[in-house]
Each structure stands twice: as C-alpha cells, then as structure tokens.
Amino acid sequence: MSKPRMNARVARRLSLELLFLVLLALAAAPLNRTRAQSQQTGTQQQPTDQAAPESGGPSGDNGVIALPKKTENPDNTPPPAPAAPKFKNPEGMPPMSLRVEVPEVTVDVGVLLEKTHTFVPGLKPANFRVYEDGVEQKIEGFRRTEAPITVLLLCEYAARGWFFRVDMLNAAWAFTQQLRPQDYVAMMTFDLNTHIVSDFTQDKRQILEGINELNNEAWSPVAFQETAIFDALNESLDRLSRVEGQKYIVLVATGIDTMSKLDLDQILKRVKASRDISIFTISTDGFFEALTQGRGGMEGGIRDMTYLQADNQMKTFSDLTGGMHFAPRFAGELPDDVREINQNIRAKYELVYHPANAKQDGTWRKIRVELVDDEGQPLRIQDEKHKPLKYQIIARDGYRAKQEVE
C-alpha cells in the first residue's frame, strides 16, 4: 500500500520541477530574442561599413567626440593691461594743459600782365607751385580774394624841397580817391619825427581834409630838412602789428634817410620779420632825378648815387613784402600807378600751406612761387590772337619763422 503513495510523491515533485523549468524557459526567451536581433542587425550592417584607408586613418563610426573643458584661466592668456597711471599736480599748482600749434603760412600772390598791369584771373590751385628754401610745399588752401583793405599812408613831408612835397600830396590824393567805403585808412607823415594826420577811419573825407591842410602849408617853410625814414617805417610796422589781418603800407617818399637811429641792415631785418604786412612804395624824386642825372658838377656824382640808392632801398622794402615799387616822373602817371596798387591789393590769390620744416627756430625762410600748366611746364599766357603775354608774379620773398617762446 505504501509503494503507490511514494510514486505519487515522486510524480508531484517531478511535476513541480518540470513547471519550474518551463517558467525559467519562458523568462529567458525575450533576452535570447533581443540578442538574436542584435546579432542579426550587426550582421546586416557590417557589409555597409567603410573599409579602413590604406594610410591607416580612422574608419567607420568614430563614436562620440569629447571636447576638453576650457579652463577659466588658461596658461596662455595674456595678463590684463595695467591701469593708466594717475598724475596729480603738486600741491598749490593749478591744472595745466599742453597745446601744440602746427605752423601755417599764408602767401598772397598777385599775377599781373607786364604790359597792362592787369590781374590775371581764372587760375587754379594746380597752376601754382610754392617752394620754401627750395623745397616744394603742399598747397592746402586756395582762394581768390578781393576784400576791403587796411592801409597806412606813410608820407615824407620835410624841407627838402617844395616839389617833393607836392609830388607826395598828389600821390596821396590820387590813392585816397580810389578807396572804397569798407576800407580802413590812416595817414602819417614824417621828417625828423612822425606826425599822425588821421587815425584809422572808413571816412576818406578825413584823409582828404588832412591832405588839404598839408597842401596849404606845402609852399611855406617846413621845420626840418632831415628825414628819418627807417625809424618812421619801423614805427609804422609796430603800429600795424597790433592790427589783425592783412595790412598794407603805402610809402610815399624820396627814400633818403639822414637821421634814423636804425641803419639799413636793421630796418631790413625788421621788414623781413613783419607778418601780414605788404609795403608799396612810390618815389617822389623821379622828376628831380630825371632833371639832374648826369649833369655833373662838384657834387653831381654824389647826388646821383644818393637818389639811386634811395630808389633801391624803396624797391627793396616792397620786394621783401610782396608789394610794388613805382618811380613816376610826371604827375600824370600817378593815377595809373595807384590804380595798379589798388588792383594788386584787392585782387590776389591766397595760398595756404603747412611748411615741411615745422621747426619754430626764428630763421628766415625764402619763398618762391611759380606758375605751371596741367603738364607741369611753365605756364604760358596768350591773348586773343595767340600772341604770348609776359606776366609777373608778385609775392613776398619769404617770412621769419616764429620762435618757440612766442
């Protein structure tokens, strides 16, 4: 009876073990299926992989590229710029500033025909060449000017001879007649000393009244025969140096100096150092020189040399400052002469440049102006019949550079 009971126990145990095996097989089936799919996929994709290059480079999928993390302070980062130093003025010293001035030179150029003395219009900046001490300068400013003028009539009025005084008065009268309402004019005479006839005014009637008063006394004896033209010119330059802008001196005199404190070299140096001042000269000894020149006599040679030297001095004053010199022999020439002066003063070309030599050493700088055509050749001017016309360039010979202490 016990044997069948044992067989039933064994059978139950076997059935439990079999059930356990079945459950274990069912649990392992998904994992095996996943591995099989993975192997199958790898087998299908393997033929599509690229073969490794013969040079041994990378092949196939290289995987994820990992970039190194940037450090906040890498070793090769340059150090920060140092802070700007802070300067502090010494105690008790006010704030100071430094100003650097670039030198600028203005040259007034007149271009007149030699035959008619008429102004040549229509020139362009490219027609001008400016040389300073032989070095060409770059023209940075250019314009045609015709503006009101500021002029001082400086006239010799001495007891040298009544005909000299009359010639001076005729020249001053002719010049004043051509003034315009916007012009400023003053008049000063000199013998041994200077005398102000009229201060600067825009009313030319004041100048004409002063000329009339001098004319009433022209036939009477005058105090001094001696003349100090160098001192009078030096005083005029000092007076005009305090006036802004371009100024002009019309010097009407024989040019003879007998009692000046300054000598010729000193006044020439003073004229060279003048700024923005042009001197136009009219000699009053033309008629007397024409009468006496070559007449001989005991003092004939000395007399001729005196007047020739005087004319040369007057011409030098005008040449150094870009003016003009006239030595009329007859009163009928004066209207044309002063007309040329007025035309030259009002109609000019103004050239501006910054000198290549920027040193402020007080040295004399020589200026030369040339006219050229579009090809850089000397400019030729023709009339309507294509005949060549000669012209003259009127400009100051140079200027004196400023001193650093000025």
Image (spheres, helix red, strand yellow):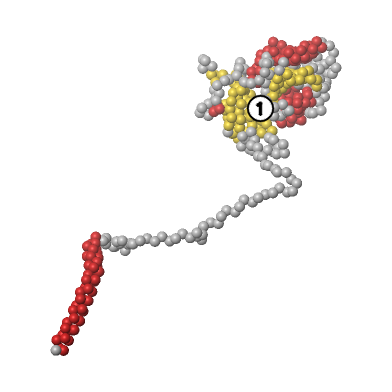
Residue 342, placed above or below residue 29 = above
In percent of the image, x 67 and y 49: which residue is there? 87
Residue lying at the far front in this picture: please name it. 1
Image-based side of 197 in relation to 126, left or right:
right
In percent of the image, x 24 and y 66: which residue is there? 34
Q: Which residue is mark 1?
A: 396
Considering the image in quadrants, where does the N terminus appear?
bottom left
Residue 87, placed above or below residue 6 = above
Q: Quadrant of residue 345?
A: top right
Question: Closer to the camera, 133 or 92?
Answer: 92
Would residue 355 be visible to someone looking at this image? yes
Image-based side of 78 in relation to 336, left or right:
left
Q: Position of residue 177 (x, y in %)?
A: 69, 13
Q: Position of residue 372 (x, y in %)?
A: 55, 27
Q: Quadrant of residue 398?
A: top right
> Helix or strand or loop: what does disc 1 sit on?
loop
Q: Position of residue 189 (x, y in %)?
A: 78, 19
Question: Closer to the camera, 191 or 106?
Answer: 106
Label 1 crowd bin: few (<14), some (14–19), many (20+), radius 10 Å: many
Image-based side of 160 in relation to 374, left or right:
right
